[in-house]
Image: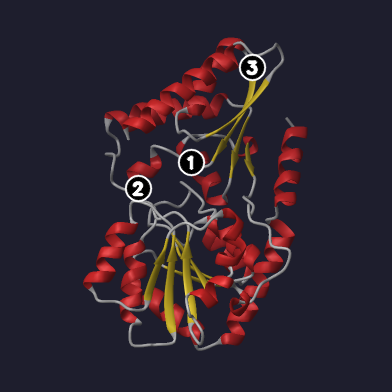
Amino acid sequence: MVRRMLAYVTYLNFVFWRVLFAPAGSRVFVVTNPPFAPLVVWVACMLRRRSWIVMLLDIFPDGLIALEQLKPGGTIDRIWSWANGCAFGAADQVWVLGRDMRMLVAERYRVTPDRIRYVPHWSSVEFSAVITVEQTRLFRELGLERKFVVQYSGNMGLWHDLQSVVRAAELLREDDRIIFLLIGEGRERAPAERLARELGLTNVRWLPYQPKAALEDSLSCCHVALISQRAGLEGVAVPCKLYGILASGRAVVAQVPAASEVALVVAEEGCGRVVAPGDAQALADAIAELADDPVAVARMGQRSREAYLAKYTIEAGTRAFEAGFKEW
């Protein structure tokens, strides 16, 4: 944490002076990573009367409040939220990754809807074609023949409920068809892995992050892909792992808030199931239902791929940025 804060301070100091002394007529585009970047850019642009856009990847302090790491209505929340409101209100446009974020920004930070632009995320992993589970190297290396593979791949941070995934695996431990493949790292991995050991689960496999060159293979090593987002985080962040799953042509089981962008996409594309955060039984039931219906799984995977090709490629993301910049 100390190293991260030092990195933030160093970077933001550079950003402030770089924006302040940029050539006349410069425009600034800033994202919320690190979280305080929009506040620094707001001050610098205000001093030099520059035009700027902020793109919200994650929204703080809202995320900390949702995770009960910051007291709502406390001094830090009030100051931080007030500063956000000033910064977002001063920006020429506020870009968001999800429709749930658009609602939060309009209601909590009083940004008028005409200044909020929805720019969907995209898959950073491009699949030229769908690969079947059996064709993947990882499937063969792990000896997953005749298994129904349920995969969680990506960040295992505080915003993701890995405990419920392990509990769902416990509920399905007697079904020897189903195996859980959990790939990634993060603060929630160790507690979840410890829980799996305590429960004596043999239907869960753990792997570290895979090299980028192997992502096409690893993301394809499943029949169903999981997405997890804790309750209260709708509008705060959009799990970008959704778009790699769509690109891979896999059915989705999303344990996310019903009003979240992920839930909206899964429902409108018909590419999976949505269950309530924290409900391990509902998650287990959804997985067991799909394991019994390979035709439905294949159909959902096809719809995922179609949605990716139509809306969530890098090319589509580029077009969205170009359109936004042309209107700026």
Residue underneath mark 3? 50
- Residue 251 seen in render: no
* Quarter of the N terminus within the rendering: top left
| Place of residue 7 in the rendered image (x, y in percent of width and height, measured from the top left) | 42, 28
Residue underneath mark 1? 107
Amino acid type, mark 1:
Glu
Disc 1 on helix, strand or loop?
A: helix
| Place of residue 86 in the rendered image (x, y in percent of width and height, measured from the top left) | 48, 24
Amino acid type, mark 3:
Arg
Distance between mark 1 and mark 2 Cα atoms: 16 Å
Q: Is residue 326 left or right of residue 75?
A: right
| Place of residue 116 in the rendered image (x, y in percent of width and height, measured from the top left) | 61, 38
**Residue at screen point 47% across, 18% down:** 13
> Which numbered tag is attached to residue 66?
2
Crowding near the residue tagged with mark 2, few <14, some 14–19, many ≥20 C-alpha atoms within 10 Å: some
**First in sequence: mark 3 or mark 2?**
3
* Colour scheme employed for the rendering of this structure: secondary structure
Of 106 and 128, nearer the camera is 128
Of 273 and 158, nearer the camera is 158
Amino acid type, mark 2:
Ala
Task: Please determine whether, in this image, residue 318 is positioned above or below residue 214.
Answer: above
* Quarter of the C terminus within the rendering: top right
**First in sequence: mark 1 or mark 2?**
2
